[in-house]
Image (cartoon, rainbow, N blue to C red):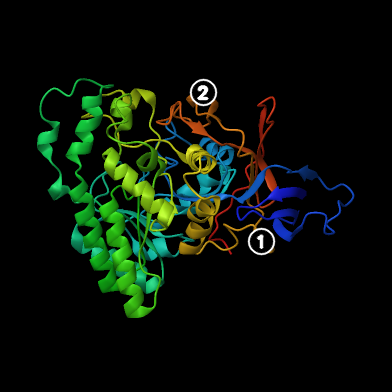
């Protein structure tokens, strides 16, 4: 395949040749990359060619939750959103806490359209020996408080997990909340039903901001003691981001290492307690939505470079499950298909630089988790590529998305969606910009840890 006249994130206009799944050449347009016989040529004039997103935080729900999502449906949703690599978390059924559970999940992942990593979990029943024999991407999501799957662990087990990971040079993704600082009184009284502002706000008041910040600080201190590389998942507070930045600076000064990293999610960037009244229990997630003031501050830290990664915490549940009421509705929202579109809309509106978006969704996660060949439009890199027209946004509608759960918290917002998504040079998604007709490729995903 030859892609001609594409504008890259840094503004250069280039022709890109792909062969055998790899980018073979990136040259100025009309500098000598002529079409070869039988080669497909994509005229990308007026559009941007970006590296495929590396979403290091998804829950594709298999095994055990295929009524919510499957590897087939989740990866179709990823491909349609320009995500070419996903990292699945361990809170499935059974949880991915030993070699046998890893193998079961890996067999199901053969249905994926996009490349993937599989994380290992930590519980009192985990078996690190068999788990680390498998091609594991990382440990985590390690839960410091219960969430979906009830995998919250005590401090001593967390410290043991950090030591195991450090000994093997494996990163650890941490879900940081301190249950002792939750405010149970926020759940007292009449919450007003499934779809009200009071219902949505109660969950945010219950899982307090200080519970997140305290747990982040504890995780960072424990990681420094063990020399483990920690990545703080779904950071929802500016104070939490600031703690990671401070610890990163201290560790870099002391050891010369890269230090801890953090991610934020699109729902914490674009939704808030004040904006979530229409969501009701559909806006219940862990950690919860924060105030508009905190949301704005988190967005500013993303813009200014303090946030390392934007990942989705794609956590689908069915409409029926989310309608059960606040006490019984599961936590989590879908998001893998709207990651790039929402951030690219912010680029279109002048709120974020395109190079910044490229870094936090592609280059940085690939680097942090050691996923070779991903996250770059460069000679020798995997041809994981996304073609987008920044002048052509469209409204986000659940009916046009591809997750099995059938809804989105971002209904009605604008997004810039891909026209073409490639995984190692294979077309996994294509959309006609005029008619809107879509097509998907075959499952070509493979474990990025398989050498």
As measured in the structure, the alpha-carbon distance from the residue carrying label 1 to the one carrying label 2 is: 35 Å
Number of marks in the image?
2
Q: For residue 119, which quarter of the picture? A: bottom left
**Residue nearest the observer in this picture, 56 or 348:** 348
Q: Residue furthest right?
A: 37
Point out the image quarter for the C terminus: bottom right
Decide: is 312 above or below 217.
above
**Residue nearest the observer in this picture, 294 or 123:** 294
Q: Residue 432: percent from the left, percent from the top? A: 69, 31
Q: Is residue 149 visible?
A: no
Residue 83, numbered circle: none
- The kind of secondary structure element at disc 1 is loop
**Residue nearest the observer in this picture, 190 or 108:** 190
Q: Residues within 10 Å of mark 1 (few under 14, many from 20)?
A: some
Decide: is 202 above or below 223.
above
Q: For residue 419, which quarter of the picture? A: top right
Relative horizontal placement of residue 445, taking residue 123 as reference (left or right): right
The residue under the point 60% across, 43% down is 113
Q: Residue furthest bottom?
A: 255
Please report contact status of discs 1 and 2: CB closer than 8 Å, yes or no: no
Q: Return the residue at label 2.
A: 399
Q: For residue 67, which quarter of the picture? A: top left
Q: Return the residue at label 1.
A: 378
The residue under the point 57% across, 46% down is 110
Q: Nearer the viewer, mark 1 or mark 2?
A: 1
Q: Residue 129: percent from the left, percent from the top? A: 37, 66
Instruction: Choose the circle earlier in sequence order: 1 or 2.
Output: 1
Decide: is 168 above or below 336.
below
């Amino acid at each position: 395949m030859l892609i001609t006249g594409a504008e890259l994130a840094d503004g250069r206009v280039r022709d890109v040749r792909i062969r055998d799944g790899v980018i073979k050449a990136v040259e100025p347009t009309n500098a000598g990359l002529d079409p070869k016989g039988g080669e497909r040529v994509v005229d990308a004039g007026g559009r941007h060619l970006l590296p495929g997103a590396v979403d290091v935080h998804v829950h594709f729900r298999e095994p055990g939750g295929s009524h919510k999502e499957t590897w087939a449906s989740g990866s179709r949703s990823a491909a349609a959103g320009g995500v070419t690599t996903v990292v699945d978390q361990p809170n499935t059924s059974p949880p991915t806490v030993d070699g046998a559970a890893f193998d079961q999940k890996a067999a199901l992942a053969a249905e994926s359209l996009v490349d993937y990593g599989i994380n290992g979990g930590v519980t009192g029943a985990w078996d690190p020996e068999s788990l680390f024999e498998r091609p594991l991407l990382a440990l985590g999501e390690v839960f410091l408080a219960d969430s979906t799957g009830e995998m919250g662990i005590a401090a001593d087990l967390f410290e043991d997990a950090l030591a195991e990971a450090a000994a093997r040079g494996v990163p650890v993704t941490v879900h940081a909340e301190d249950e002792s600082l939750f405010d149970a009184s926020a759940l007292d009284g009449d919450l007003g039903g499934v779809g009200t502002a009071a219902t949505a706000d109660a969950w945010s008041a219950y899982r307090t901001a200080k519970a997140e910040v305290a747990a982040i600080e504890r995780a960072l201190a424990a990681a420094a003691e063990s020399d483990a590389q920690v990545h703080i998942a779904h950071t929802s507070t500016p104070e939490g981001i600031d703690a990671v930045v401070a610890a990163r600076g201290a560790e870099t000064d002391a050891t010369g290492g890269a230090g801890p990293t953090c991610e934020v999610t699109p729902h914490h960037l674009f939704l808030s307690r004040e904006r979530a009244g229409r969501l009701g229990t559909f806006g219940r997630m862990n950690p919860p939505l924060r105030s508009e003031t905190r949301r704005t501050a988190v967005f500013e830290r993303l813009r200014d470079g303090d946030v390392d990664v934007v990942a989705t915490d794609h956590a689908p549940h069915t409409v029926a499950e989310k309608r059960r009421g606040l006490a019984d509705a599961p936590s989590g929202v879908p998001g893998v298909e709207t990651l790039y579109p929402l951030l690219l809309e912010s680029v279109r509106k002048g709120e974020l630089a395109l190079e910044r978006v490229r870094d936090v969704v592609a280059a940085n996660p690939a680097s942090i988790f050691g996923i070779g060949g991903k996250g770059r439009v460069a000679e020798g890199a995997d041809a994981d590529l996304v073609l987008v027209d920044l002048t052509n946004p469209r409204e986000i509608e659940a009916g046009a998305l591809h997750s099995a759960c059938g809804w989105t918290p971002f209904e009605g917002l604008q997004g810039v969606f891909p026209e073409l998504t490639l995984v190692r040079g294979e077309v996994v998604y294509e959309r006609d910009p005029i008619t809107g007709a879509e097509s998907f490729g075959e499952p070509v995903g493979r474990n990025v840890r398989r050498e």
